[in-house]
Image: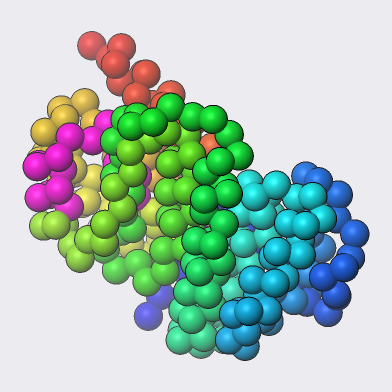
Amino acid sequence: MNRAIEFHVVPKLVLAHTCTCEAAVTPGTALRADEIAELTHRVLSGDDAGALAFVEAVLARGLPVERIYLDVLAPTARRLGDLWTDDVCDFTQVTLGLWRLHRVLREFSAAFGSEVEHAQEGLPVLLVPVPGEQHTFGLAMVAEFFRRAGWLVWDAPMTGRHDLATMVRSEWFAVVGLSLSCESRLETLASCIQTIRRESCNRSIGVLVGGRVFVEHPDYVARVGADAAAVDARQAPIQAQNLVAALAHRP
């Protein structure tokens, strides 16, 4: 079973252990490692109410929801992945921890979307994990940033390349974003991208990839046949918009 975890197209994210929620945080600053450990402990121990209270306390200290996403929730997801890699936690513990982070993410979704004004009903984007990916917390966060930027987000689960082919054949998408957590599925991703380009009703569709593997190995973007890689969740909609503009001028 894969030993990496998907926190993708979303790199800079959240919290730790052994300090109280009252520690001082100034707007726009990341939390300390001990605070990240604290939130990690709460989601691993099943303390749903405590996890939400922790994040609400940070929010009350002046951190905007965007920073909650990037500097609180994401680092916590990354910490869970590290605990799995180091054999400190098993697959089930990490899965439940990420599920609790999903719940926190949804709690702040409305507030996050209202932080900025954006156009409604923008370009459609399909966001999917590579078949076989077990965790999709990072992709859920990416979807939040796309929605806030005015994109029309499709993020229904896909079980395989057949579902992906059916979706891009029947619906017009400006961009498809795929997330990948580890090198072992690079060939699967490359095959998915080939399917998208072959079956899409938009012959100029853009393909954006994300995940730690592309941050560590930028050359993999070309290897899998993608157009670009998203550095983090906040940059993903910007990179997608730039990609659409570039494709519009492609001969």
Q: Position of residue 85 (x, y in %)?
A: 56, 77
Residue most toward the right? 24
Q: Is residue 55 visible?
A: yes
Quarter the N terminus occupies: bottom left
Q: Is residue 10 above or below residue 218?
A: below
x 47%, y 34%: residue: 149
x 54%, y 30%: residue: 117
Q: Position of residue 23 (x, y in %)?
A: 89, 65
Whether residue 79 is in magenta: the answer is no
Quarter the C terminus occupies: top left
| Occupied quadrant, residue 201 | top left
Q: Is residue 224 visible?
A: no
x 64%, y 71%: residue: 52
Q: Position of residue 104 (x, y in %)?
A: 56, 66
Is 199 on the left-hand or right-hand side of 175?
A: left
Is 169 or 149 nearer to us in this picture?
Answer: 149
Is 137 on the left-hand or right-hand side of 192?
A: right
| Occupied quadrant, residue 184 | bottom left
Q: Is residue 81 above or below residue 120?
A: below
First to last magenta residue range: 164-178
Q: Position of residue 233 (x, y in %)?
A: 52, 46
